[in-house]
Image (tube, grey):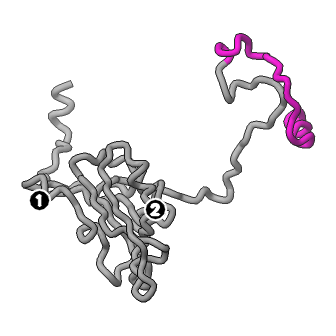
């Protein structure tokens, strides 16, 4: 075993000089996005703050001024802070955002010398004006190819093991006391 590995090329990378390619779906630094016209995508709905399991996001929202709006909504985030020391990079914030305002980009070089440097404020998170992007949303919400037909189990009125285990109900051939929603689906299921 040792002799075989001795002849192979080592997999070690000399990190600062050689950087390993990061997969597209890697979750790294948070970015707040803008629309093409420069307005912020964040509408101050607080959904990302509410869904964060680590409590790493703090937002204070305020009403938009009619003469100089900051975002397209009625409100905008006056304060938007992300504590990178508390964040677990789960991606719940970007999945909860209705406007795709926040994404976790694949910048994973997040080291800092002080705790304060790892508390990102709105100015640190916002992408520069004139560089409106959607971030890595296309990696998180891929569209399935048209050739793929999703198989949905037909409601046959009989236990098929898809929703619970046979051990949980006692027997695998347990008859359910329900009628199928669509009789045509019942006929197609029996034909197969």
State left or right for residue 105 relative to residue 50.
left
Q: Is residue 43 left or right of residue 118?
A: right
Residue 60 quadrant: bottom left
- Above or below residue 177? Residue 75 is below
The disc, 1 or 2, on the residue closer to the chain's N-terminal end is 1
Instruction: Confirm whether residue 102 shows in the render.
Output: yes
Left or right: 135 with respect to 74? left
Instruction: Give me the disc on residue 74.
Output: none
Q: Which mark is residue 17?
A: 1
Q: Is 121 one of the magenta-colored residues?
A: no
Can residue 21 be seen here? The reply is: no
Q: Position of residue 59 (x, y in %)?
A: 34, 60
Residue at point 23% right, 68% down? Answer: 124
Q: Position of residue 151 (x, y in %)?
A: 71, 43
Q: Residues within 10 Å of mark 2 (few under 14, many from 20)?
A: some
Where does the magenta region start and end?
166-192
Question: Which residue position is annotated with label 2?
Answer: 45
Q: Tell which tag, 1 or 2, sits nearer the viewer.
A: 2
Residue at 38 percent across and 61 percent down: it is 103
74, 149: nearer the viewer:
74
Q: CA distance from mark 1 to mark 2?
A: 42 Å
* Residue occupying the far bottom of the picture: 67
Tell me what residue is drawn at x 20 percent, y 44 percent. 11
The one of 120 and 151 positioned closer to us in this rendering:
120
Report helix, strand or loop for mark 1. loop
């Amino acid at each position: 075993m040792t002799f075989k590995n001795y002849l192979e090329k080592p997999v070690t990378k000399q990190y600062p000089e050689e950087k390993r390619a990061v997969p597209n779906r890697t979750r790294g630094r948070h970015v707040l996005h803008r629309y093409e016209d420069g307005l912020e995508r964040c509408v101050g709905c607080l959904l990302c703050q509410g869904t964060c399991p680590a409590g790493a996001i703090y937002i204070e929202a305020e009403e938009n001024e009619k003469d100089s709006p900051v975002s397209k909504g009625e409100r905008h985030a006056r304060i938007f802070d992300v504590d990178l020391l508390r964040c677990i990079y789960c991606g719940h914030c970007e999945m909860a955002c209705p406007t795709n305002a926040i994404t976790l980009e694949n910048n994973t070089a997040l080291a800092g010398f002080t705790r304060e440097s790892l508390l990102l404020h709105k100015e640190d998170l916002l992408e520069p004006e004139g560089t409106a992007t959607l971030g890595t949303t296309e990696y998180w919400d891929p569209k399935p190819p048209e050739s793929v037909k999703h198989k949905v189990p037909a409601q046959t009125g009989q236990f098929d093991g898809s929703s619970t285990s046979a051990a949980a109900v006692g027997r695998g051939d347990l008859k359910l006391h329900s009628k199928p929603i669509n009789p045509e689906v019942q006929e197609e299921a029996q034909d197969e």
